[in-house]
Amino acid sequence: MAGQSTLDEAAQDTNTFYRRTLHVLSDAGVPFLVGGSHAFLEYTGIVRNTKDFDLFLRRSDMDRAMEALRDAGYRTELTFPHWLGKAWQHDDFVDLVFNSGNGVCPVDDGWFDHAVETQVLGMPVKIVPCEELLWQKAFIMERERFDGGDIVHILRSRGDRLEWGRLTERFGDRWALLYTYLIFFSFVYPSEAHRLPSKVLSDLAARYAAERSAPASDRVCRGTLVSRAQYLVDIGQYGYADARLAPRGGMSAEDAIFWTWAIDHVK
């Protein structure tokens, strides 16, 4: 389904800004994928009126993208060096995303290999693959934002068409989070449980049973992967290791400190 989520008349100037941004990056030969509400609309048919506009690209292409945008008159910044940049003109902006806030979902060649061609704002573009959209959303469980509703809507619309092997590979040793959402889906839609592949559920259930029979000795809190605020007490007072940090995760200590500071200082 092609379409746009910023539909009201007041958004037309902003949509012109978004189209120009797409032209600037395309003319500069910078590969990108459209995500956010536009990808969600494509995969679920659910429209959201939002001014967010997310472009996903490889980290190796960020410098070239920001240079092209600066040359076109945009202001740019690498807002969070481990995952996100921004580009503005006046009050309008786009997010340039090359990872997830927790550092575990980097944009790599696989995103582009499985991207879907469609139209956004009347322009031909590629959007992020459904599997990667779900994967990244799975890690958003803040007090003020929980993307579980988005995930179950994606599963309801696309569960019988997902590349489940690739999706489970994306989650890797964090497979239990995927299993959590599959159980959640069955709770939300008891009559739609057949949309989920039995083999995937059986395999994940077997992994869970095996894990329970041999508990991990690593005293780590993975809660920091799904919320940057709610599990700080666990790593600060209760002595758990932070799953975001190397060697368990992809963030440096400096990244984690800045990401925590930004909770109250960067909007």
Image (cartoon, helix red, strand yellow):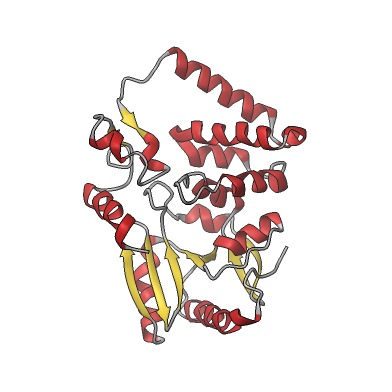
Residue at x 61% of width, y 34% of height: 184
Q: Residue 26: where, in percent of width, then height?
A: 51, 77
Front-most of residues 163 and 211: 211
Q: Residue 161: where, in percent of width, then height?
A: 70, 45
Residue at x 55% of width, y 61% of height: 36
Front-most of residues 259 and 231: 231
> Quarter-wise, where is residue 90 in the image?
bottom left
The relative height of residue 151 versus residue 17 in the rendered view (above or below) is above
The relative height of residue 191 versus residue 99 in the rendered view (above or below) is above
Q: In which quadrant is the N terminus drawn?
A: bottom right
Task: Judge whether residue 211 can be spotted in this image.
Answer: yes
Q: In which quadrant is the C terminus drawn?
A: bottom left
Residue at x 50% of width, y 35% of height: 177
- Left or right of 144: which side holds 180? right
The relative height of residue 130 versus residue 190 in the rendered view (above or below) is below
Residue furthest top in the image: 213
Q: Residue 249: where, in percent of width, then height?
A: 33, 41
> Quarter-wise, where is residue 71 in the image?
bottom left
